[in-house]
Image (cartoon, rainbow, N blue to C red):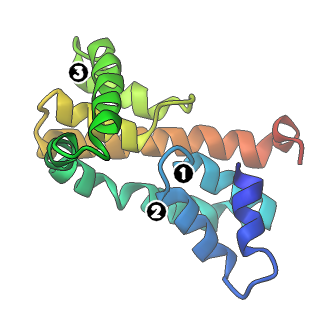
Amino acid sequence: MVDSILGLFTGKTIPPEVIIFLISMLPILELRGGLIAAALLGVKWYIAFPICFLGNILPIPFILLFFKKILALLKRTKLFGRLADKIEKKVMKKSKKLDTAKSLSLLLFVGIPLPGTGGWTGAMVAEILDMRIKKSFPIIAAGVFLAGVIMLTLTYFFPGLFGF
């Protein structure tokens, strides 16, 4: 998936730092995809990490503030009602796993880079669990940082794992 997204930018005049920032803002890919893209584009790790971290963190406050409101609006429409229900059920299922020891669970959920986890999903889960933004945002940021350290280590110091 990262390769196909990189293909959109290849040969263009967009700096690689902008590309990895934008990739890191996307749901699913987030910082993990941004760091892989950075390694493929030859961006030094000490430049890539803060760019990808900031790109991943930027959407989180908006998700924490507006996720429930947007979901409620979507549920009222014919076009997006089913999709909103599906998203809510998926997030509720993930939130049940985090119900005990919310803070540590949220940190590990965001911080261990596995499919279906990350800052976006963590923010949605925090909202469903009614965690206060003052509490959930630093935990999610720490989780993104942890995921970044793990992915940075795997991507830059063990590149053979990803085939480059």
Mark 1 and 2 residues: CB-CB less than 8 Å, in contact?
yes
Q: Amino acid at mark 2?
A: Gly
| Residue drawn at the location 27% of the way across and 22% of the way down | 92
| Residue drawn at the location 21% of the way across and 46% of the way down | 77
Q: Secondary structure at mark 3?
A: helix
The percent position of residue 86, horizontal first and vertical second, equals 35, 29
Residue that carries the numbered disc 1 in the rendered image: 31
For marks 1 and 2, the one nearer the N-term is 1
| Residue drawn at the location 34% of the way across and 58% of the way down | 59
Give how far apart the Cα atoms at labels 1 and 2 are: 7 Å
For marks 2 and 3, the one nearer the N-term is 2
Query: Please, which residue is most extreme toward the front here?
Result: 78
Instruction: Bin the neighbour count of mark 1 within 10 Å (Cα to Cα): few under 14, some 14-19, many 20 and up.
Output: many
Q: Amino acid at mark 1?
A: Leu
Q: 18 or 67: which is nearer to us?
A: 67
Give the vertical position of 129 relative to 135 (above or below): above
| Side of 79 where 153 appears, left or right | right
Q: 45 or 3: which is nearer to us?
A: 3
Mark 1 and 3 residues: CB-CB less than 8 Å, in contact?
no
Residue that carries the numbered disc 2 in the rendered image: 55
Residue that carries the numbered disc 3 in the rendered image: 102
The percent position of residue 121, horizontal first and vertical second, equals 38, 37
The percent position of residue 53, horizontal first and vertical second, equals 48, 57
Mark 2 and 3 residues: CB-CB less than 8 Å, in contact?
no
| Side of 34 where 87 appears, left or right | left
The percent position of residue 25, horizontal first and vertical second, equals 47, 59
Give the vertical position of 50 relative to 85 (above or below): below
| Residue drawn at the location 52% of the way across and 39% of the way down | 147
Q: Which numbered tag is attached to residue 2?
A: none
Give how far apart the Cα atoms at labels 2 and 3 are: 25 Å
Instruction: Bin the neighbour count of mark 3 within 10 Å (Cα to Cα): few under 14, some 14-19, many 20 and up.
Output: some
